[in-house]
Amino acid sequence: MKPIEWLTDRLRLLDQTRLPLDETYLEITDYRQVVSAIKELKVRGAPAIGIAAAYGIALGSLNLHTDHKDVFLSQLESIIDDFAQSRPTAVNLFYAIKRMSDAAATGRDVSEIKRLLVEEAASINRQEEKAMADLSANGARLLKDGCRVLTHCNTGQLATGVSYGTGLGVIKAAAEQGKKVTVYVDETRPLLQGARLNTWELEILGIPYRLITDNMAGYFLSRGEIDCAIVGADRIAFNGDTANKIGTYSVAVLARENSVPFYVAAPVSTIDSTIRTGKDIPIEQRNPEEVVQIRGVRIAAPGSIALNPAFDVTPNKYISAIITEKGIIEKPYSRNIKHTLREER
Ligand code: MRU
């Protein structure tokens, strides 16, 4: 399964909105289709959005037909701007955009810049591939044989675009070490990333799971049937406050209430050191239509007014540890995140 694949002059994306019933790949030749795919969640999950945007920018640059460097750079800027407007919360998007802009700035002429952009996108892809494998191995140490793990949203290969995921990557690595792990999968309303995508990935991996609705998590946590929760992240502030799929905060509070460890798994590219606390993380507000219907079937009374924040912020105090490719970060987060980022440079 390759959710994101660069094919010399095209980008191939697995359309995640059609899973689990249809495995359809999109062959994309116009960067605007990549922007739409990100907005419509055909490609989704913080690291996957970053990788897709990087390839999308490279694709857009290949289709610019001018040899005049200044004209090329101004058209490239407008392409980059389209990506920057696509989704506001996942910082991996802005991390990828910065790397692509920096790469473009080092090229001497148009053909060199195009080559550098394709190479930089591939480099981001390779770096995330390694980061996810390493963080998965680090996190697997926290999972005991026979453990039962609660997940929220999809945090597997689909969400990262590479062989391991974040939260599901940790679970996959533990299973590969021969540990028996059972996953409790929150369905994750409104768009059902848990029910549609985690179940699909867990079936492929052959890891046992039970699907639950979001409001069942407290029931199982309170009965001692869950040993830990592992979620991913879309943006981690410098103090460890973490934005992730809406509902993550409720899981964290319920885990704390029941003395169950709550872990965040994310590559360091998800840490935004320019943001001090979670209060400053921009939260995407999506179309309320996603709430009043499920997969095209209306479930609310005509005229219902819905709200649809796509993410919430879990305060650092609820987070037992942050699992990264550089190691497991514990409290106090501001100090330890600073150390981790310093080693990264
Ligand atoms: O709206 P989505 O589906 O892109 O949200 C995804 C999540 O919230 C994931 O948990 C997050 O990106 C981290 S998983 C790599």
Image (cartoon, helix red, strand yellow):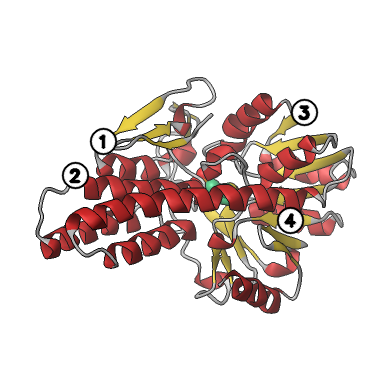
Looking at the rendered image, the quarter that the C terminus falls into is bottom right
Looking at the picture, tell me which residue is in the foreground, 207 or 278: 207
Return the disc, 3 or 1, that comes first in the chain's sequence. 1
Residue located beneath label 3 in the image: 208
Where is residue 121 drawn, in percent x and y? 39, 51
Amino acid type shown at disc 2: Asn
Return the disc, 2 or 3, that comes first in the chain's sequence. 2
Residue 169 badge? none
Looking at the picture, tell me which residue is in the foreground, 342 or 314: 342
Residue located beneath label 2 in the image: 63
Return the disc, 1 or 2, that comes first in the chain's sequence. 1
Q: Element type at marker 1?
A: loop
Q: Element type at marker 4?
A: strand
Where is residue 38 drawn, in percent x and y? 39, 44
Looking at the picture, tell me which residue is in the foreground, 9 or 328: 9
Q: Are circles 1 and 2 on residues that touch, CB within 8 Å?
A: yes
Name the quadrant containing residue 163. top right
Give the Cα separation between the discs numbered 3 and 4.
20 Å
Residue located beneath label 4 in the image: 263
Give the Cα separation between the discs numbered 1 and 2.
9 Å
